[in-house]
Image: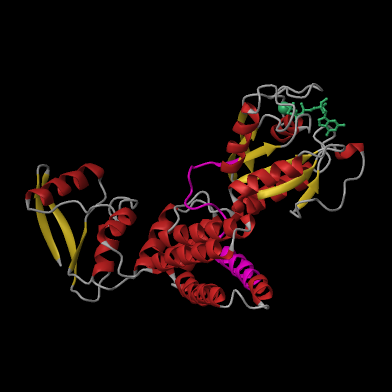
Amino acid sequence: MGFSLKLPVGELPAFAWVLPGPHTLTGEDVIELRVPGNPTIIRQLEERLRELGCRDAEPGEFTRRALECGKLDLHKAEGVLQLINATTDTARRQALSDLSGETATVLAALTERLRTLSARFEMSFDFSEEEHALADEAALKNDLKTFVHDLETVVGTHDAAPRRDRAQIALFGPPNAGKSTLFNALLGKARALVSDLPGTTRDPVEADLQVGDHSARLIDLSGVGASDSDRGRYTEHARERALQADVLLLLDAPGQSELSPEFDVLQRRDGSVRSRALWVFAKSDLGPADPMNPAGLESLSVSGLSGGGLDDLRTRLAQRLDQSATGGATSLLRIRSREACKLLSQALADTPPPEVVASDVRRALKLMDEALLVNAPGEVLDLIFSRFCIGK
Ligand SMILES: Nc1nc2c(ncn2[C@@H]2O[C@H](COP(=O)(O)OP(=O)(O)OP(=O)(O)O)[C@@H](O)[C@H]2O)c(=O)[nH]1
Ligand SMILES: [Mg+2]
């Protein structure tokens, strides 16, 4: 219907679409105003509407209202949020899958599987005196391992929500492994100091690196291991930074053997680090690398000096960054599920007594139940909707 609005500059001809509820996004009556798109006129129109008692919508208010009137479930609402903030195709794909309800359905089935596993763990104590208890325990752990793998496939392996807007790629390994040389080769310029003296890099050196369609932060760390001249301080710092990285390049040069025990240290602290690590046989110009690496990780050969293998490394880095959800907001559904994943892979890496594994399985189950909670408490809703932008 056509009408006019009195503005400071004169009478504005406008057109209003009236959409009666309940067949609208929020279930309420909606009026849509169509006016000529002059920015000053729009501002004056907004002021006039405020004078008439209207107000701006809060961030995410429309989606929240849709949720509250049952037009949208929480996971779909989070899908909307993810889609708005997605900056990579992976994040967009995840968001669309969440929006369609597909992720929630798959996670609900996985949660039931975990519930059965949890019950089996509880029951295994009752028979712990029996002869076949040990065999059962091994089978249970195996099933749990398969479960963790399946869950990781659905929610991605990246640690919880994106902690930063730029993914971090860290170079980790013993002194003289060729980290700084590879750092410079990837950047195409000599930023980090290179020398044949072990222990050249001390404090981390960082630079921006474009990998495919990702802007990442490349970090050259100090060498780790026995030759740390500062009684382990640099090693410790390098380990901490390595654990925070989205992609971890483990540099293993010919004749060095310190990497494997160092990686074990990282795994003991955070079992999920495996999923972010790539084993890099460095200095490949010196001779062919072992086809296998002790940690059984995905591996490749590179020479920072000759540039051999660099293209392959770039391709794999891009794939890893695609896999990690960095670059888009992540739903609580995925955050909780990933926390459960991390907890379980930690439990499997540490080989604690069965009672401890069982209690970790219980905790993981609680997280999954929380992830799938449809009647979320108010504060969870506040948390979700505070991340929306105005007017969505
Ligand atoms: N042949 C060969 N030598 C390399 C390669 N990369 C590094 N080097 C040599 O190995 C030595 C150590 O290289 P860096 O890059 O400084 O090693 P790093 O891992 O950063 O060492 P720290 O900073 O001490 O931990 C230098 O003499 C480099 O020239 C490579 O790909 N091939
Ligand atoms: Mg160095």
Q: Quadrant of the N terminus?
A: bottom left
Colour style of the rendered protein structure: secondary structure
Quadrant housing residue 71: bottom left
Where residue 80 appears, as percent x and y from the top left, is 39, 61
Image quadrant, ligand 2: top right
Quadrant housing residue 310: top right
Where residue 166 appears, as percent x and y from the top left, is 53, 41
Q: Which residue is nearer to you in this view: 2 or 326?
A: 326
At x 31% / y 55%, what residue is drawn? 385
- Residue 363 lies left or right of residue 174; in this view the side is left
Q: Quadrant of the C terminus?
A: bottom left
Q: Which residues are magenta?
A: 140-168
Where residue 31 appears, as percent x and y from the top left, is 18, 64
Is residue 310 visible from the viewing direction of this image? yes
Quadrant housing residue 66: bottom left
Q: Residue furthest right?
A: 287
At x 64% / y 49%, what residue is drawn? 267
- Callout count: 0
Query: Is residue 5 shown in magenta?
Result: no
- Residue 56 lies left or right of residue 307; in this view the side is left
Q: Is residue 108 above or below residue 42?
A: below
- Residue 388 lies left or right of residue 105; in this view the side is left
Is residue 26 visible from the viewing direction of this image? no
Q: Which residue is nearer to you in this view: 73 or 4?
A: 73
At x 30% / y 69%, what residue is drawn? 375
- Residue 90 lies left or right of residue 298; in this view the side is left
Query: Is residue 143 shown in magenta?
Result: yes
Where residue 383 appears, as percent x and y from the top left, is 32, 53
